[in-house]
Amino acid sequence: MVKQIINLISPEVFKILLVFLLSFLIGLEREEWKLTSGKYAFGGVRTYPLIGLIGYSMASLSSGQMLPLAAGFTVIGGLMMLSYWHKMQSSQDSGLTNEMAGLATYVVGALVYHDRFWIASTLVIISLLLLELKSMLEGLAHKFSPEDILTFTKFLFLTAVILPILPNKTFGIFEINPFKTWLIVVAVSSISYGSFLLQKVFKDRGGVALIALLGGAYSSTVTTVALAKQSTRNQSPHRYAGGILMASAIMYLRLTILINLFNHNLGKELTLSFVLLALFALIGGWFWSSKKDPNVTPSEEKQSYSARNPLELKAAFLFAFLFVVMVIVTHYTALYLGSSGLYVLAGIMGVTDIDPFILGITQSTGHSTSLSVAGGAILIAAASNNLIKGIYAIVFGDQPTGRQSFFLLLSLAILGLIPIIFLNH
């Protein structure tokens, strides 16, 4: 698209127009902010385009040398320092946003000259977002604590530090691949962490349904227990039971994503069944939660709960260990006990976190486990987990919520076993 436009006009004309347009957008945003806030701000719709054009001109005159371009950057930086000094003298509000925007505009001009159109456009777009979303971004500081920042650092450690250094080859008779093993940990952690962040952003805003949808991606079991406990303080069994069912619906969607990521053939066998089960649980849960309870009050409409940190390093290493153990156990179970033994193991694993078992199955499928048997084991594990969550709802919730949740999850568990019939044919 860009090349076609360049062919219609002179390349130099196109580049100058692009620099002007991108710089003008930054200047327009800063001019609007200056008029709205009434505060001093460096430059506007004329200054920023001039800075961009200076950056383009210096890049043109430098003939590939960095020194003239760096000298121009230094001069613009000096002007930014004078602006910042003036701001400090006249106001206590001495942020560096305008000055940084001016330096970025200079760089945009140089990038366009060197045909880095995508980088220049992306830089401007990101800059505009950062400038325009000032209030929202600063508001995040009230939603995220130092512990949350530490959590994000752990996420980067899991993904950007550990994952790249692991060998991407198999070891031993069980063909354990350290890279793929940790990649599974990263995938599960990413989904849980995404849910964790959304719960932070929407904290105290949504009702039971939002808790169920976001919490189901984090952990449907944890969400079930949390909603069941909340039900003892609020007489609204239909709302909580419906929310618990919706959390299990998200569990099926979560498993669909993970299975397709790590075993495409197994994903093709289970995706349709899991999506249909998820839709049934979502629609059924929404319908059930919409039924009014006679004792509910308006103050009970909005609820919240705090999810645990999903990125504890101990939990990540424990998950990796459990995954390897499940690969080994699944191998020997299928080898010595056959499909019946694997189905029994799947039913037992439903009592605990089923992710290590199910993802272990994805790695053994095609080797020690056939596609149909692996699919059946996963369906049994998910159904067993639904049944256990129904029992948790009875134990931790009030009686009406517990009974309704158990009935709904038992129905979902039974429906979740029906696709096994089609897998075996």
Image (cartoon, rainbow, N blue to C red):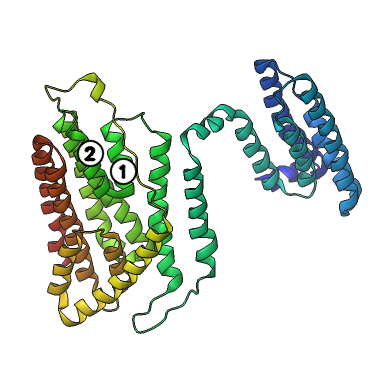
Residue 150 in view in this figure: yes
Real-space Cα separation, disc 1 to disc 2, in angstroms? 10 Å
Q: Which of 230 and 4 is in front in this view?
A: 230
- Identity of the amino acid at label 2? Leu
Residue 283 image position (x, y, % from top left): 21, 38
**Secondary structure beneath label 2:** helix
Question: In the image, is residue 104 above or below residue 370?
Answer: above
Residue 347 falls left or right of residue 223: left
> Going from the N terminus, do you reach mark 1 or mark 2 first?
1
Q: Quadrant of the C terminus?
A: bottom left
Residue 27 image position (x, y, % from top left): 73, 27
The residue carrying mark 2 is 227
What residue sits 51% from the left and 34% below the top?
A: 140
Question: In the image, is residue 332 above or below residue 194?
Answer: below
The residue carrying mark 1 is 215
Image quadrant in which you'd find residue 376: bottom left
Disc 1 crowd rating (10 Å Cα; few below 14, some 14-19, many 20+) is many
**Secondary structure beneath label 1:** helix
**Quick check: marks 1 and 2 in contact, CB under 8 Å?**
yes
- Identity of the amino acid at label 1? Gly
What residue sits 69% from the left and 24% below the top?
A: 93
Q: Nearer the viewer, residue 110 or 189?
A: 189
What residue sits 14% from the left and 47% below the top?
A: 390
Residue 61 image position (x, y, % from top left): 91, 46
Question: In the image, is residue 143 above or below residue 221?
Answer: above
